[in-house]
Image (cartoon, rainbow, N blue to C red):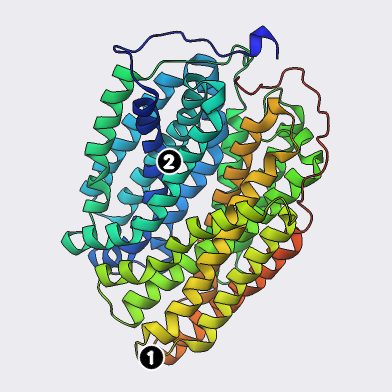
């Protein structure tokens, strides 16, 4: 590694701190970002009740608007912070996320809420990569692997407790799912200023492709809009066709810029690495199924069975609790079973969970027989698939590309979440009466199963082989 690639401390914290304090402070980023996904999903029916008259297609933008901006800005904002200073980027992200959370809680109509959710996403896209960069720079080499595992594990913890926390907060008022971020954000800002040393990557000298980020955000947003509004507008209507044309044009423009810009959002050279390319495809597909599955179970329990938010949260929690357990199992057998096979097993199990739900749920609530078996199988599938996809994506990349590669595969997952929510809305539509609603949800679960099986097929291509050399001129390097 050249000297220019080594991150330097540019500003000492107010007080020296132990590694544990630094790790705890920076791990809040992974925790907050993951917790947000689950608690807002659980809150969606309560928000719907408060904003009466809004369709599911409109309400879906509470989830999709966030994911679109998070996906588009994650890599560029991380690179900007690498260049200008990660600590300021992290603090700015925390501040934006915290202020936006307060604004979300104060929103009096749906579209104001959607707008401030977008601002939340900007904050999350700034704080997530910078937190990891700061952690790696502040941690001795012999402790880096352990620190990153703990950082990532906080996200799994948030997934496990998120449904229950969301249910408890919504029982008081759905606005509390946003207000809870305020004390956490303020505390993290104070701790960061006092204890976390700054760092930057001297190898990053160019401004990232912000125009490309805008193009991919508009492209994915337009695609989601066409999907969720297709039933209302008509699939052959001019508005729908125009929206899809805009989506294709923006995505094509994004790819053209990626091939020309010196610091693109997605480096085309990375996609020549077979494991990385297939891991991103699998990440998109698996996230489509995951997002559809999460919103489907929440809406079924609350709007069809009429369960309360806290009861829904408790019902959803066993699935996420399976994830860290079977992620550990997959890690233990990873040296004997190829990564692609492990991820494929996880995708097949998640697809099987959708089939179980499609064939078992009925009008009369019977959680233990109708929901729990399929939901547990789905949690096992996520435990096998998701960590394997994330680790295999960067396994064949040169060390100078692992940070960028991790950002890109996280971006791919967010794109999948947007498409998953949108496809669910498109399949379910606006059914009237129990029979039509049941048929619509069954169709959605079968669609999830089909997508999961497709993901299993693409996963087989992502088993890492030998690192492929990539050109290095003008591209960011991994911090030491």
In the rendering, at what x and y percent does residue 49 appear? 25, 68
* Neighbours of disc 1 within 10 Å: few (<14), some (14-19), many (20+): few
Q: Which residue is mark 1?
A: 363
The residue shown at (62%, 46%) is 390
In the rendering, at what x and y percent does residue 334 appear? 68, 52
Cα–Cα gap, marks 2 and 1: 38 Å
The residue shown at (26%, 38%) is 184
**Residue 269's quadrant in the figure?**
top right
Q: Which residue is mark 2?
A: 30
Can the viewer see residue 48? yes
The number of discs equals 2
Q: Nearer the viewer, residue 369 or 225?
A: 369
In the rendering, at what x and y percent does residue 411 appear? 58, 43
Tag 1 secondary structure:
loop
Tag 2 secondary structure:
helix
Of tags 2 and 1, the one toward the viewer is 2
Quadrant in which the N terminus is drawn: top right
The residue shown at (38%, 62%) is 59
When the figure is inspected, residue 155 is found, relative to residue 43, above or below; the finding is above
Q: Nearer the viewer, residue 104 or 52?
A: 104
Apparent side of residue 438 relative to residue 42 in the rendered image (left or right): right
**Residue 193's quadrant in the figure?**
top left
């Amino acid at each position: 590694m050249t000297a220019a690639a080594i991150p330097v401390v540019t500003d000492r914290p107010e007080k020296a701190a132990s590694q544990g304090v630094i790790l705890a402070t920076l791990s809040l980023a992974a925790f907050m970002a993951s917790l947000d996904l689950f608690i807002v999903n659980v809150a969606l029916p309560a928000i719907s009740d408060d904003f009466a008259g809004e369709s599911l297609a409109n309400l879906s933008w509470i989830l999709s608007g966030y994911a679109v901006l998070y996906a588009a800005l994650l890599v560029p904002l991380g690179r900007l912070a690498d260049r200008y200073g990660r600590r300021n980027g992290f603090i700015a992200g925390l501040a934006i996320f915290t202020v936006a959370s307060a604004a979300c809680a104060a929103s009096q109509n749906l579209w104001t809420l959607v707008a401030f959710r977008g601002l939340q996403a900007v904050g999350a896209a700034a704080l997530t990569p910078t937190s990891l960069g700061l952690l790696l720079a502040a941690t001795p080499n012999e402790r880096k692997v352990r620190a990153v595992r703990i950082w990532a594990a906080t996200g799994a913890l948030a997934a496990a407790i998120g449904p229950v926390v969301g249910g408890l907060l919504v029982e008081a008022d759905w606005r509390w799912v946003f207000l809870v971020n305020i004390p956490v954000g303020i505390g993290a800002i104070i701790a960061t200023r006092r204890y976390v040393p700054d760092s930057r990557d001297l190898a990053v000298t160019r401004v990232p492709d912000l125009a490309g980020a805008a193009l991919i955000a508009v492209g994915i947003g337009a695609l989601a809009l066409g999907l969720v509004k297709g039933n209302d507008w008509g699939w052959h209507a001019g508005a729908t066709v125009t929206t899809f044309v805009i989506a294709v044009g923006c995505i094509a423009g994004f790819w053209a810029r990626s091939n020309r810009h010196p610091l693109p959002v997605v480096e085309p050279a990375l996609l020549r690495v077979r494991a990385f390319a297939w891991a991103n495809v699998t990440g998109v597909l698996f996230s489509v199924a995951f997002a559809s599955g999460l919103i489907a179970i929440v809406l079924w329990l609350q709007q069809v069975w009429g369960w309360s938010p806290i009861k829904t949260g408790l019902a959803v929690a066993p699935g996420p609790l399976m994830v860290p357990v079977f992620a550990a199992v997959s890690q233990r057998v990873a040296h004997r079973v190829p990564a692609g096979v492990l991820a494929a097993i996880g995708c097949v199990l998640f697809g099987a969970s959708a089939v179980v739900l499609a064939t078992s749920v009925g009008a009369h609530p019977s959680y233990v027989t109708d929901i729990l078996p399929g939901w547990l199988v789905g949690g096992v599938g996520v435990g096998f698939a998701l960590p394997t996809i994330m680790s295999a994506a960067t396994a064949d990349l040169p060390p100078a590309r692992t940070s960028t590669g991790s950002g890109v595969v996280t971006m791919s997952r967010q794109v999948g979440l947007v498409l998953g929510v949108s496809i669910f809305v498109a399949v379910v539509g606006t059914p009237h009466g129990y029979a039509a609603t049941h048929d619509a949800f069954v169709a959605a679960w079968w669609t999830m199963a089909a997508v999961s099986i497709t993901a299993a097929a693409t996963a087989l291509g992502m088993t890492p082989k030998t690192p492929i050399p990539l050109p290095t001129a003008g591209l960011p390097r991994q911090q030491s």
